Image: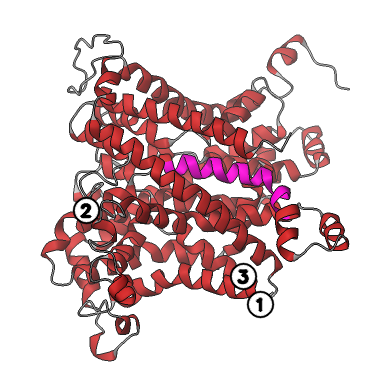
């Protein structure tokens, strides 16, 4: 028991230390990579790095772009994903099994293989480079969220639906008035699960946004990291300040709603 | 039993379901199925970028793009690199996530704290965490200050034999929380009777772990191995940022990184697509081998 607990503690340290160090590094006036530098020293603390990164990549604008990209994906997943999840769980129609199997198959298609053809189609054929629509389109409906919605709709008692149908309610009003209010926790889980995808996504928005004022924070920060930081006075401080701003929303959401995240992965990972 | 008309037999009991799934099916077709076919098409043609709407001839070239790809030393090196990555990343992921999940399953105190701390790297953007790893692992970084005279020279990320292993350890660290939770769920399904039987036979703790836990979570292990392989084959962000574009001198370049350089930076989407198709075929073959190897005692 003691051995296991010690192992867990070491594990927690290894996982959390880089985050602590990220915060400390972002507040140092002079980067201090010595062992002593891992502890906050009052003489070496500053908020200047945050001002520096804000000036270089316009944090507000980048956060807004990340927010629009993520918000668009969440909206698409909620509207179209709930419709699909409900139909897959509760309606008998031709092709249902096929759609369900496609949904599972999608989970193993490596998205990176699709980047070149999607780039050719979205950027070259449809001219959607440097636009929010082009950014959102490949992520519009999160298949894992559709799967979670379906699982929750399946758990509702059948009598509920039969009664509403006998009353002559249309499927759309059954979905909206009966089913959706009963699966609110699933909607929250779906939103959280969908959030971390586009918020953290790098490759796709990196490929299609060349204008700086349309880049999400993950892209503008990485451009700063690869090109501009060499010229800054304290490059690590500024990069780490940007990293803290990028990490904070996802980490905060996860800590506040940690039970939701965890039950998601249990059901989609193992029962799937 | 409800009686159905001939139309009901063709469309099903609730034909409106078709309308409900249509947006999702259109999305899957437009974003997955069509690009997948288009990638294969491009890889067999002389495809190049043109202005939107321009009509040009794109002749069929057979396996020319594949010949170009396979005779490119940078591509061959990248495929070798990703094998090095997988050899380190996959076994390390399986062993560490199973051990930590097993310990977490038995833990009474601080369960939520441990669960959250293991999962935090997984929910954080790689771009953000890469910043702090660069700070930790650069030549004068904290890791080298702690190691003192044991620090490698040249340092981790600029050392051609250590760059790829460091990237592999980074990715293991970042993804581990997801796999720990997968194992944690699988451990709930291992029957308590088996542990009791093992105790009656006088099995020690290690024997219990090897003879009851490990076989009990075998289906989860198959899933962990497959998912870790697919994730590893998709490696892009880490070599792009952590080792400055696959450095030093291509030692940590991944196939997706080369695919991006050839396909988009250098404007040869046909060659890029051929790399992608080869990568997927490679992953499928590897997944088949792994399934046979890891899942053999399942049936």
Residue matched to label 2: A223
Q: Chain of mark 2?
A: A
Where does the magenta region start and end?
A: B213-232
* Quadrant location of the C terminus of chain A in the rendered image: top right
Helix, strand or loop under label 2: helix
Q: State the CA–CA distance, disc 1 to disc 3.
A: 18 Å
Instruction: Please give the residue where the numbered disc 1 appears in the rendered image.
Output: A2
| Residue B207 makes an appearance in the image | yes
A201, A191: nearer the viewer = A201
At mark 3, the secondary structure is helix
Vertical relation: B202 (above or below) A118: below
Cβ–Cβ below 8 Å for labels 3 and 2? no
What residue is shown with label 3? B112
From this viewpoint, is residue A84 visible?
no
Q: Are marks 3 and 2 on the same chain?
A: no
Q: Decide whether residue B202 is among the magenta residues.
A: no
Quadrant position of residue A97: top right
Among the 4 quarters of the image, the one containing residue B274: top left
Residue drawn at (67%, 43%) of the image? B219
Q: Residue at x 21, y 18 (%)?
A: B53
């Amino acid at each position: 028991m003691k051995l296991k607990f010690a192992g867990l503690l070491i594990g927690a340290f290894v996982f959390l230390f880089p985050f602590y160090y990220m915060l400390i590094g972002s507040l140092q006036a002079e980067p201090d990579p010595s062992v002593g530098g891992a502890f906050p020293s009052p003489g070496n603390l500053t908020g200047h790095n945050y001002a520096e990164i804000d000036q270089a990549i316009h944090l507000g604008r980048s956060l807004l772009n990340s927010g629009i990209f993520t918000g668009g994906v969440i909206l698409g997943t909620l509207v179209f994903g709930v419709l699909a999840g409900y139909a897959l769980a509760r309606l008998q129609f031709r092709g249902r099994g096929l759609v369900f199997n496609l949904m599972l198959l999608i989970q193993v298609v490596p998205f990176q293989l699709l980047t070149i053809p999607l780039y050719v189609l979205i950027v070259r054929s449809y001219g959607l480079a440097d636009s929010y629509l082009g950014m959102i389109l490949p992520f519009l409906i999160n298949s894992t969220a559709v799967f979670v919605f379906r699982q929750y709709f399946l758990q509702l008692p059948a009598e509920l639906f039969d009664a509403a149908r006998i009353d002559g309610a249309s499927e759309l009003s059954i979905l909206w008035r009966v089913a959706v209010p009963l699966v609110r926790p699933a909607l929250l889980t779906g939103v959280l699960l969908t959030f971390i995808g586009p918020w953290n996504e790098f490759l796709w928005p990196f490929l299609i946004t060349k204008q700086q004022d349309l880049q999400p924070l993950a892209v503008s920060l990485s451009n700063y990291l690869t090109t501009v930081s060499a010229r800054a006075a304290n490059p690590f401080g500024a990069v780490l300040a940007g990293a803290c701003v990028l990490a904070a929303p996802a980490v905060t959401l996860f800590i506040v709603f940690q039970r939701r995240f965890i039950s998601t992965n249990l059901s989609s990972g193992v029962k799937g | 039993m409800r009686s159905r008309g001939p139309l009901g037999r063709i469309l099903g009991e609730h034909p409106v379901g078709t309308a409900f799934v249509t947006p999702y099916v259109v999305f899957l077709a437009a974003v997955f199925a069509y690009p997948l076919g288009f990638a294969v098409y491009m890889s067999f043609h002389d495809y190049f970028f043109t202005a939107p709407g321009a009509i040009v001839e794109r002749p069929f070239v057979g396996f020319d793009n594949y010949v170009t790809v396979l005779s490119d030393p940078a591509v061959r090196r990248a495929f070798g690199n990703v094998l090095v990555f997988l050899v380190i990343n996959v076994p390390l992921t399986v062993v560490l996530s199973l051990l930590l999940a097993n310990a977490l399953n038995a833990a009474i105190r601080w369960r939520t704290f441990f669960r959250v701390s293991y999962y935090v790297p997984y929910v954080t953007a790689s771009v953000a965490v890469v910043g702090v790893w660069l700070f930790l692992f650069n030549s004068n970084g904290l890791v080298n200050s702690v190691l003192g005279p044991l620090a490698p020279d040249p340092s981790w990320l600029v050392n051609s034999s250590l760059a790829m292993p460091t990237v592999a350890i980074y990715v293991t660290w970042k993804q581990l929380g997801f796999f720990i939770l997968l194992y944690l769920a699988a451990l709930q399904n291992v029957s308590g009777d088996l542990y009791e039987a093992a105790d009656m036979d006088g099995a020690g703790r290690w024997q219990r772990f090897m003879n009851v836990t490990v076989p009990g979570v075998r289906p989860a292990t198959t899933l962990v191995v497959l998912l870790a392989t697919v994730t590893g084959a998709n490696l892009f962000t880490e070599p792009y940022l952590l080792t400055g574009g696959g450095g030093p001198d291509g030692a940590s370049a991944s196939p997706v990184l080369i695919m991006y350089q050839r396909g988009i930076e250098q404007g040869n989407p046909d060659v890029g697509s051929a790399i992608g198709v080869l990568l997927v075929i490679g992953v499928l073959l590897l997944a088949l081998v792994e399934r046979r190897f890891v899942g053999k005692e399942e049936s």
